[in-house]
Image (spheres, rainbow, N blue to C red):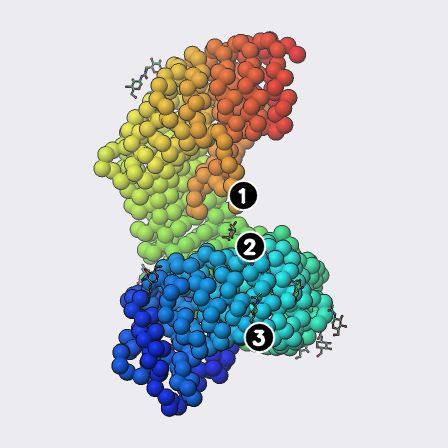
Amino acid sequence: MVYLILCFFLGFFNSSLLSLSLPLPLTHLCHPEQSSALLQFKSNLFCSTPNPAQICDVPNFLKTDSWDEGTDCCKWEGVVCDNKKGNVISLDLSCSGLSGYLQSNSSLFSLQNLRWLNLAGNDFGNSEIPPEFGKLRSLTYLNLSDTELTGLVPPEISFLSEPISLDLSQNHPFLFRNHDFNMLVHNLTKLEIMVLDDMNLSVVLPYSFHNFTVSLKHLSLSDCDLQGNFPTQVFHLLYLRNIILRHNPNLIGYLPETNWSSPLRLLDVSWTSFSKGLPDSIGNLKHLKTLNLDSCVFVGSIPSALGNLTKLTLLDISSKCSKGKFLIDVFPSSAFNLTSLNFMDFSSNFLRGTLPNNISGLSYLRKLQLYANLLSGRVPGWLFILPPLYLHSNKLNGPIDPIQEPNLVLLNLPFLDLSFNNLSGNIKSCMLVKLRNLSLLDLSHNNLLSLTSCNYGANSTLPMIIEFHFSSCNMQRFPSFLNASKYLQLLDLSNNQIHRSITKWEAEGWENLTTLNLFMNFLISVEKIPGKHLYFLELSSNSLRGPLPTPPQNLSFLLISNNELVGEIPSKICNLSFLSVLDLSKNKLGGTIPDCFGTFGNKLSMILRTLNLNGNQLEGSISQSLKICFNLEVLDLGNNNINDTFPYWLDTLTNLEVLVLRSNRFHGGIQKFNRTFSFRNLQMIDLSRNEFTGHIPPELFENLKSMKDIQVDESGPEYIGGDYYQDSAIITMKGSDFKLERILTSFTVIDFSSNHFKGSIPKEVGELNSLIVLNFSHNRLAGNIPPSLGKMTALESLDLSSNKLQGKIPVQLTVLTNLGALNLSHNNLEG
Ligand SMILES: *[C@@H]1O[C@H](CO)[C@@H](O)[C@H](O)[C@H]1NC(C)=O
Ligand SMILES: *[C@@H]1O[C@H](CO)[C@@H](O)[C@H](O)[C@H]1NC(C)=O
Ligand SMILES: *[C@@H]1O[C@H](CO)[C@@H](O)[C@H](O)[C@H]1NC(C)=O
Ligand SMILES: *[C@@H]1O[C@H](CO)[C@@H](O)[C@H](O)[C@H]1NC(C)=O
Ligand SMILES: *[C@@H]1O[C@H](CO)[C@@H](O)[C@H](O)[C@H]1NC(C)=O
Ligand SMILES: *[C@@H]1O[C@H](CO)[C@@H](O)[C@H](O)[C@H]1NC(C)=O
Ligand SMILES: *[C@@H]1O[C@H](CO)[C@@H](O)[C@H](O)[C@H]1NC(C)=O
Ligand SMILES: *[C@@H]1O[C@H](CO)[C@@H](O)[C@H](O)[C@H]1NC(C)=O
Ligand SMILES: *[C@@H]1O[C@H](CO)[C@@H](O)[C@H](O)[C@H]1NC(C)=O
Ligand SMILES: *[C@@H]1O[C@H](CO)[C@@H](O)[C@H](O)[C@H]1NC(C)=O
Ligand SMILES: *[C@@H]1O[C@H](CO)[C@@H](O)[C@H](O)[C@H]1NC(C)=O
Ligand SMILES: *[C@@H]1O[C@H](CO)[C@@H](O)[C@H](O)[C@H]1NC(C)=O
C-alpha cells in the first residue's frame, strides 16, 4: 500500500519537476561570485555520508565531486543557470551524501536568483533551519525533506511568497508555531504542493487550513500530531488531487456531503479520528485511485456508490484498531465490480450479508481482507482464485465446495484462512492437492468441519505447506498425509478428538517441524516426538500415561500439563539447553525435584523462565540448585508433598514474579528477611495451606516493590510470559479458587492463609498500595487490624477471617472503594 501511494505521488512530482528544470542551451558562463559561493558552500560540508538518507531510494550520488574551481559552474552536476543572464537558478543536491552544519552565514543564501532548491536527503547535523532561507525571494521550489534539520521553522519562511512546492517533511523534531504557520498559509498564495509529514504541528490549529490557497493540489500532513478539528472546506479546494492526513490520532473531522474537489485521486485519513459516515457523494470522485479510511471512527453504512469508483486501486475501509465500525446490513457488493483494485480491506467491521456467487472485476487483486465481520452463507469459488485470502472470524457456513470441486483449477493461492467460521462438511486430504502453492492453511474453529485422509496420493498433498492449523475441528485421526510436506513448520491440531497414540510411522519425515500443538486431545502415548528443530511442544490436557516421553533436544517450550504421567522427573531434562518454559503441572509425577537445574555451565540455568510442577506428588525438599536460574520468573510448586522450610535463598532470583508453594508441607518460620531488595519483583506470593509458623515479618513488605505504585500501562493489558506461552495460576479470591489462564503483569496477590502464623499483622503491609488480593485467613494472628490497611487502595479482596483478631474494625477500611470481597468473620472484632 505504501509502495502504491509512493509511486503515485512520485510520478506526480516528476511531472512538475520536469517543467522547471528542462535543460536549456547555455550561452553564458557562470558568474564568478556565484561560482565561489557554491565552492564555499561545498567547502563547509563533507560529502562522504556512506548511507543514503531514508527518503533516498538510490545510493548517494556525490554531485559536488564535479565542482572544480576554474570550470563553468553552469555545467556542474546539480546546477542549472538561467539562459539569458547566466545566474544560478536551480540547485539540486538531493541525496548527495552531504553532511555538516547549515549556518546563517552560509554562502548558499547569496544565490539570490535561485528558483529551485533541493537539499533533501542530506545530513545537516541537527542544525536549526536558518532564517536566511527567507532571503531567497525567487524560490518556487524548496525541498528540505529528511535533512536532519531541527527546532522551530523560522517565521521568515513566509517571506518566500513565490513557492509552488514546499517540502519540509521527515525532520524530527521539527516544530511550527501556530502564528508562523498562519502567516505561511496566508502568504504562500501560489502553493500547489505542501509536504510536512512527520513534522510536529501539535500547536498549529487546523482552523488555519481554511486559508489554504485555492491552487493547492497536494497536501501531505501524515504523522504531524495534529490536534482538533480539520476544516471540511479543504476537501472543496478546486484543484486538490491528493490529501494525506494519515496517522494523526487526535485529528477530528468528517468527510463532506457535497462539493468534493473533483480531481481528487488520493484520500488517506487512516488512523485519525475522522468520524460520522462515508457519504454517498464519494461516488462522484471519478478519478479516485486510493481511498484509505483504516481505523477511523466511522459508523454507518458503506454507500453502494463505491462501485462507481472504477479507477480505485487501493480500498481500505477496515477498522483494525478502533472502536468505530461500519455497521451495514448488506456487504457493499458493488465493491466487487471495481476492476482496477489491487488491495481491498474491509476487515474488522460489522459487515453482514453474503458474498456474491460470481464477480466480474477484481482481476488485479493482490490482497483481499474480509476477516472479523459477520459475513454468512457459502464460501464462493471465485475467492480461491484470488491470492491470498483472509476470511477468518465470520459466520460463513456450509461445506467448502471449491476445494472439492473437480473442475476448478486452483492455482496460486498462498494463504487460506477460514478459521473461526461455521463451516461444515468433510474435506478429503486428496482434494487439497489442487492447492499446490498453499503455504498457510487455517481452518481452525469450524466445529462441523472434518478432515479425512485419502488412502492414496499421500506424497503429493500440500507440497508447499508451512503452517497447518486445524484446531477445534472435530478431527479424529492424525493427518499422516502431511508427512510428505517437506516444509511444514507449524502443526496445530489442538482441541480435537485424536485418540490413542501417534505412531512412529505417522510422525516420520518432519525434520522441519518447529511447533507442534496437540493440546486437548485424547492421546495416550506418543511413540516419537517428531522434529529435531522442534522448539514448541504442547501436549497438555491429553491422557498421556507412563513416564515423561523423551523430548527433542532443541525444545524451548515443553508443556505437558494435565496428563497422567508417572515416575520421576528424569534429570536428563536438564540436558535441554534451550528450555525456557517447563510445565508438567497436574500429573502424577513423584520423587524429588531433580537437582540439576542450576548446574553451573549448564545453559538451561540461564534460560529457564517458568518452572511449573504444580499438582503432582513431589516430595523431599526444593533443590537449592534453582538459585542460579537467574531468569526464573515463575516458580510454581503448589499442591505437592514438599517438606521443606521457606526457601530464602530464592531471593537471588531478582526476576522472580510468581512464587507458589501452596498446599505442601512447608514448615518453620519466614521471619529471616535480613536483605533489602530481596523478592523485589514478586507480584504473586502464595504460601497458603502449609505449616508455616512464627511471625509475619514486616521486612518482607518493605521489599515487595512490585506491589507498590504500579503505573497501569495505558497501551493495553500485558501478561506474564510472551507471544508463545503465557503463564497461568490458580488463586483464591473472594472465597473461592479460580484459575487465571494468563496473569496480568499488574495483578498482585499475597496469600498466607491456612498456616500457623501468629503475632500481629504488620502495619507495613498497608504500604502495598497496588496489592489486589490479600489473604491471611485461617491463622493465629492476634491484635488489632492496622488502620494502615486503609491505604491499600487497589485492594479488591481482603480475607482476615478465622484468626484471633480483636478490637474495632478501623474506619479507614471504608475508603477502600475497590474492595469487592471482605471477610473478617471468626475473629473477636467489634463494630
Ligand atoms: C559562520 O559562522 C560560524 C560561527 O557562527 C563561524 O565559525 C564560521 O567560520 C562562519 N563561516 C563563514 C563561512 O563565515
Ligand atoms: C523532495 O526530494 C526528495 C528526494 O529527492 C523526493 O523524494 C521528494 O519527492 C521531494 N519532495 C517534493 C515535494 O518534491
Ligand atoms: C508576505 O510576503 C511579503 C512579500 O511578498 C512580505 O512583504 C510580507 O512581510 C510577508 N508577510 C508575512 C506575514 O510574512
Ligand atoms: C510535539 O511538540 C509538543 C510541544 O513541544 C510536544 O508536547 C509533543 O509531545 C510533540 N509531539 C510529538 C509527537 O513528538
Ligand atoms: C485567513 O486570513 C485572513 C486574512 O486575510 C484572516 O483575517 C483570517 O483570520 C484567516 N483565517 C484563518 C482561519 O486563519
Ligand atoms: C457547495 O457549492 C454550492 C455551489 O457552489 C454552494 O451553493 C454550497 O453552499 C456549497 N456547499 C457547501 C456545503 O459548501
Ligand atoms: C453511480 O453510477 C450510477 C450509474 O452510472 C449512477 O446512476 C449513480 O448516480 C452514480 N452514483 C454516484 C453517487 O455518482
Ligand atoms: C457489476 O457489474 C455488472 C455488469 O458490469 C452488473 O450487472 C452488476 O449489477 C454490477 N454489480 C454491482 C453490485 O454493482
Ligand atoms: C509419489 O512420489 C513418487 C516420486 O516423486 C512418484 O513416483 C509417485 O507416483 C507418487 N505417488 C503418488 C500416489 O502420487
Ligand atoms: C527441510 O527443509 C529443507 C528446505 O528448507 C528441505 O531441503 C528439506 O528436504 C526438508 N527436510 C525434510 C525432511 O523435509
Ligand atoms: C519433614 O522432614 C523432616 C526431616 O527433614 C522430618 O523429620 C519430618 O518428619 C518430615 N515431615 C513430614 C510431614 O513428612
Ligand atoms: C543474613 O544475610 C547474610 C548474607 O546475606 C547471611 O549470611 C545470614 O545468614 C543472614 N542471616 C539470617 C538470620 O538469615
Classify mark 3: residues with Cα within 10 Å, few (<14), some (14-19) or many (20+).
some
In the image, 158: left or right of 40?
A: right
Q: Which residue is mark 1?
A: 714
Q: Nearer the viewer, residue 62 or 287?
A: 62
- Who comes first in sequence, dot 2 or dot 3? 3
Query: Is 7 above or below relative to 443?
Result: below
Front of the two marks 2 and 1: 2
Q: Nearer the viewer, residue 805 or 438?
A: 805
In the image, 504: left or right of 132?
A: left
Query: Image point 38% across, 43% down: which residue?
Result: 557
Residue farthest to the left? 601
Q: Which residue is mark 2?
A: 202
- Determine if the C-beta at disc 2 is less than 8 A from ligand 4: yes
What is the spatial separation of the Cα atoms under label 1 and label 3, in whole angstroms? Answer: 44 Å
Q: Amino acid at mark 3?
A: Lys
Helix or strand or loop: what does disc 3 sit on?
Answer: loop
Q: Amino acid at mark 2?
A: Ser
Q: For residue 566, which quarter of the picture?
A: top left
Helix or strand or loop: what does disc 1 sit on?
Answer: loop
